[in-house]
Image (tube, rainbow, N blue to C red):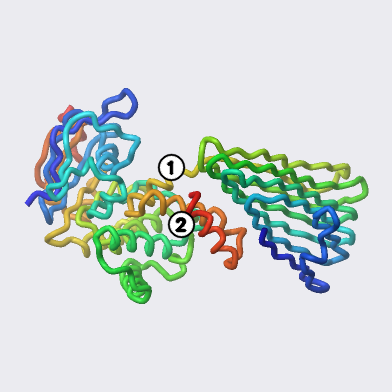
Amino acid sequence: MALLEIKNLHVCVGDKEILKGLTLTIEQGTVHAIMGPNGSGKSTLSNVIAGNPVYEVTEGEILFKGKNLLALKTDERANEGVFLGFQYPIEIPGVSYATFLKQALSCKRKYLGETPLDPVQFIKRLKIRAQALGVSDDMLKRSVNVGFSGGEKKRLETLQMAFLEPDFCILDEMDSGLDVDALRVVGQGVGIMREKCRSFMLITHYQRLLDYIEPDIVHIMINGKIVASGDKLLALRVEEKGYACYK
Amino acid sequence: MRVINKRLSPSEIFHEDVIDASGTYVIEVPEAAQYEGVFLLKGENLKINISLSGEKASCRVKIVYLSCNELNNNILCDIYHNVPQTYSSQFVKGILAESGRTDYHGTIHIPFDSQKCEGMQNHQAILLSDTASVICVPELEIYADDVKCSHGSAIGALDSSQLLYLQTRGIDLKEARKMLIQGFLSDLLPKSFEKDILDWMVQHA
């Protein structure tokens, strides 16, 4: 069953059209990698799905679990199960990680009409996820993303994802600025989360992320459109020959 | 107004002891003593006059103000470094909603002979609406030539990228605004004042 269906999507920022009729279907339980040169619209695509108001959809539609995603607000999309892992996670001074995650989970439960969060259960759940990703209690007490290294920030993005258990995870250049060890931690985090009902969209410039997270389908995006799709060998071919042959 | 006044040495003081007939907090800090004052204002006038009168005397003033329709604040804070080697700091943070307005005027006075003093002033405010306004004058009046002083002010709206980040985690806009405001004020306010802020935000954030 299709989890996400994007049909003929056109997106503008100001007067500039960035996505020019993009069509993409992501089935439940699959991992899709989107590769493409700088400025091809990869980050725009992830931001539009997540609901960043800077981007204006001028044509086309996005269906998530059959619902019109574009009619939902950013927070509603998240609570429906869309998660965007940021390329550059935002710093929020004065708000601790634990408070932030508690608030996020309570909002989700409220949205889904579930019973309010039990504080003891919350701590238990958080600790289990944090330990698996090597995130210490001390890190959870600190302000969101303030003073963390690039690797730690990405690890904490992975923790948020593991904690909130979304159905669709978009990872926007999770590999940028990571050393091999940090990349492995993020890769393992995603690996643990691969399930039948959960899908991933990995945005990346490099093949090396795909060594840790093996994709089912690789798409090449050029100039606001998907121009080629194939299996993981496509990523290897790009690594070898570049994007020139797709332009 | 909610106030915590403490003199860490030689003895505790209470805020009734330091208000003069005109409603000004007049505080004299003797040699080697420290004074810390925390003030929370919601549409009030506050005048503070602190004299650092003995060497190694220091003071730290923390002011948080909340402003909304017809609840305007006027803050006047003067700190006098009367002798050498005295230290002061003022941290002021404000949240302004609707057509709220606040005037903050802070001055550090350092006369000729008061060398080796350190004074610091910092004001930050968040405007939650287009009609809110703040007038901020962080002044230094320095006549000595061997001192370390700084003053600064930053006024702006809530950060849209921070709001978006919280929303992408399922937190609705109103809740996200509240979290950012609480985070912004968290370094100045003690836990005991938290409820005042939360109550105010229910209506105005």
Q: Nearer the viewer, residue A177 or B177?
A: B177
Q: Tally the marks.
A: 2
Q: Residues within 10 Å of mark 1 (few under 14, many from 20)?
A: few
Q: Is residue B20 left or right of residue B189?
A: right
Question: Mark 1 or mark 2, which is nearer to you?
Answer: 1
Q: Secondary structure at mark 2?
A: loop
Query: Horizontal and vertical percent for residue A242?
Result: 21, 35
Residue A236 visible in this rendered orientation of the protein: no
Q: Residue at x 29, y 39 (%)?
A: A43
Q: Amino acid at mark 2?
A: Phe
Q: What residue did someone put label 2 on?
A: A148
Type of amino acid under label 1: Ser
Provide the secondary structure element on which disc 1 rests. helix
* Chain of the residue that carries numbered disc 2 in the rendered image: A
> The C terminus of chain A appears in which quarter of the rendering?
top left
Rendered residue at 30%/24% (across/down)? A16
* Numbered mark located on residue A13 in the image: none
Give the image location of residue A90, x and y in percent: 42, 49
The residue at the far right in this view is B113
Q: Residue under label 1, please give it.
A: B160
Write the residue at 20% across / 53% down: A168
